Image (cartoon, rainbow, N blue to C red):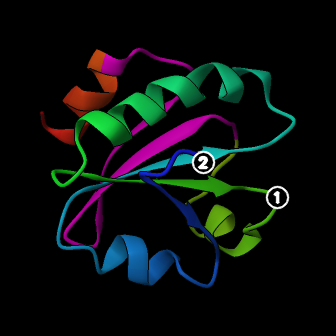
């Protein structure tokens, strides 16, 4: 996992995402998901280019069933943006960097 990406779990999600002072892009992913592997380099690029502006986290849906259920994740990849502890945007499926940055408000 890229250095600028936070590995999210059921245990640290609230602290890392909901209590974050900066907007957070959360990539809901799975190791067995082909489209997730296609999206990963795009998410990593955003994490590197926007370090300090946005926080980027990855959450493996198989390892974090509580959070997956809480946000009703039915398909992966799903990307959600959280601002001020609230869900502010969502995209399901593979997309490009421009769309994800737009989702963050950039």
Is residue 55 depicted above or below 94 in this figure?
below
x, y percent for residue 25: 37, 49
x, y percent for residue 28: 60, 48
Identify which residue is drawn at 87% across, 35% down. 32
Horizontal side of residue 44 vs 39, given as left or right = left
Give the Cα separation between the discs numbered 1 and 2: 10 Å
Is residue 81 depicted above or below 13 in this figure?
above
Residue 93 visible in this rendered orientation of the protein? no
Verify whether residue 50 appears in magenta.
no
Horizontal side of residue 105 vs 11, given as left or right = left
Verify whether residue 85 appears in magenta.
yes
Identify which residue is drawn at 40% across, 14% down. 96
First reached walking from the N terminus: tag 1 or tag 2: 2
Mark 1: which secondary structure? loop
Residue 38 visible in this rendered orientation of the protein? yes
What is the magenta range?
Answer: 75-97
x, y percent for residue 41: 53, 25
Density class for disc 1 (Cα within 10 Å; few <14, some 14-19, many ≥20) is few
| Residue denoted by label 1 | 62
- How many numbered marks, from 0 up? 2
Q: Residue furthest right?
A: 32
| Residue denoted by label 2 | 28
Horizontal side of residue 7 vs 81, given as left or right = right
Question: Which residue is at the front of the view, 62 or 86?
Answer: 62
Q: Quadrant of residue 60?
A: bottom right
Identify which residue is drawn at 15% across, 51% down. 53
Question: Which residue is at the front of the view, 84 or 73?
Answer: 84
Is residue 58 depicted above or below 103 in this figure?
below
């Amino acid at each position: 996992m890229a250095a600028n990406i936070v590995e999210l779990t059921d245990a640290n999600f609230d602290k890392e995402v909901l209590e974050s002072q900066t907007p957070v892009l959360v990539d809901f992913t799975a190791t067995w998901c082909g489209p997730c592997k296609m999206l990963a380099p795009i998410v990593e690029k955003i994490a590197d280019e926007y370090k300090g502006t946005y926080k980027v986290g990855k959450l493996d849906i198989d390892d974090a069933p509580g959070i997956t259920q809480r946000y009703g994740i039915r398909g992966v990849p799903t990307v959600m943006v959280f601002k001020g502890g609230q869900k502010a945007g969502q995209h399901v499926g593979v997309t490009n960097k421009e769309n994800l940055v737009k989702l963050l408000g950039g």
